[in-house]
Image (cartoon, rainbow, N blue to C red):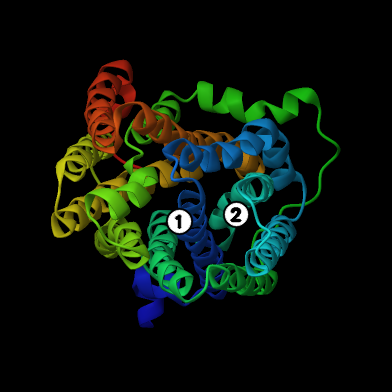
Amino acid sequence: MSLAATNPTARLFGHRPFLLFASGRVFSDLASQIATVAVGWQVYDMTRSAFDLGLTGLFQFLPTAILVFIAGHAADRYDRQRVVQACQLLQGTVAVFLAWGTFGGWLTVPWIFAAMGVFGVATAFRSPAQSALLAGVSPEGLVQRASAVSNGSFQTAIITGPMIGGLTYVVSPGAPYVLMAVFWLLASILNGLIKLDRPVAAKDPPTFADLFAGVGFVRNNPAILGTISLDLFAVLLGGATALLPIYAREILETGPWGLGALRSAPAIGALLMTVFLTRHGVNRKIGIRMFQSVIVFGVATVVFALSPWILLSLVALAVMGAADTVSVVIRITLVQVATPDNMRGRVGAVNFLFVNASNQLGEFESGVTAALLGAMPAALLGGIGTILVALLWMKLFPELRKADRLE
């Protein structure tokens, strides 16, 4: 018997559809992470406003809130690969627009906000379809390891993307947008090469009840509801990464390269944790492990908030990334395993709405709080709030706290 047949990791990495999926995700997420540095630095350089930094997240979130249920049903009704490809091509086109405006000198903050809105529309449709693809491209019985590797692909992009974004921004503010366009084109090509073992057939036009079926499914599964909502409120309060341009410039006194390093630090910790989870997994007491990881995330956020030294800040951010990875892998695997394939798009859309709200509304909340109280108090309150939410959710969702295994 071959090693690939007996070794789950070798079997996963020898599966061509999954390799193409993971590679495409690297390029797509790489472009997104370059955008976080380029857009964040450009907006703050133009305005010196923490509130405007927060608005960039809000403009990305609003399309998700409006389109999420339609996007989820699209992922279940249409070819998921084509949905992902179309969204990546749209994002690449917007990146070309941003490069054109930056090189031409006419790009303004309102135009950037409009571009973020289009990014939000594309992401609203892409994310549920991409999430629903994961189970279809994974070998049977290896969804948890596939989730860990997929998350590792995302973390790899987070490590390299901000660094590339910061360094290319130093060369020219328009250069990061050119790279974003190239990377989204490559991602679209790789996704087009995937041949699914378990394709989704087109269905009849949706009814009103079909559109919201994912909400009912999540509501009737306490473990899934507790997991998704925990991520929402914990990251919503602990969104200190939105304040990194302020920390880099005014507290840690560094430049775009330092901002890139700070952006990359959580992903370094996350990638190390991903390697561990790919080999060993979380096999027992998944509920309590979830809560422990969120509490560690909150404590690390408090340390980051109070740190005046870039080295300590980088370590705290790395710990945040490692703790968040445990939570993400458990959440993704739980949703994938517990959801029928014909509903994965709609349930994935609900999950994405919660995750996107936690990330992008968290950026808005952090920006508003920082504008009112200052960056350090805002980050500190967010870390404390994350810890309190985890403790409260342990009481509200005993089913999740007592959950033992993912399978």
Mark in front: 2 vs 1: 1
Gap in Å between the C-alphas at discs 2 and 1? 29 Å
Identity of the amino acid at label 2?
Answer: Gln
Is 75 in front, or is 46?
Answer: 46
Which mark is on residue 41?
1
Quadrant into which the N terminus falls: bottom left
- Residue 139 visible at all: no
Q: Which percent across, then down, holds residue 147?
A: 43, 56
Residue at the disc numbered 2? 130
Q: Nearer the viewer, residue 238 or 295?
A: 238
In the displayed structure, would residue 28 be above or below residue 266?
A: below
Residue 189 horizontal/vertical position (percent): 68, 74
* Quarter the C terminus occupies: top left
Q: Where is residue 223 in the image (x, y as percent from the top left)?
A: 39, 28
Mark 1 burial class by Cα count in 10 Å: few <14, some 14-19, many 20+: many
Residue 406 position, x and y percent, is: 36, 43
Q: In this view, does 339 lie to the left or right of 380?
A: right
Whether residue 256 is visible here, answered yes or no, is: yes
SS category of the residue bearing label 2: helix
Quadrant assignment, res 234: top left
Q: Residue at x 32, y 16 (%)?
A: 396
Say which residue appears at 49% left-offset and 66% top-offset: 30
The answer to whether 90 is drawn above or below residue 168 in the figure is above
- In the rendered view, does 377 fall on the left or right side of 243? left
Residue type at mark 1?
Answer: Trp
Picture residue at 56% right of the left edge, 50% below the top: 131
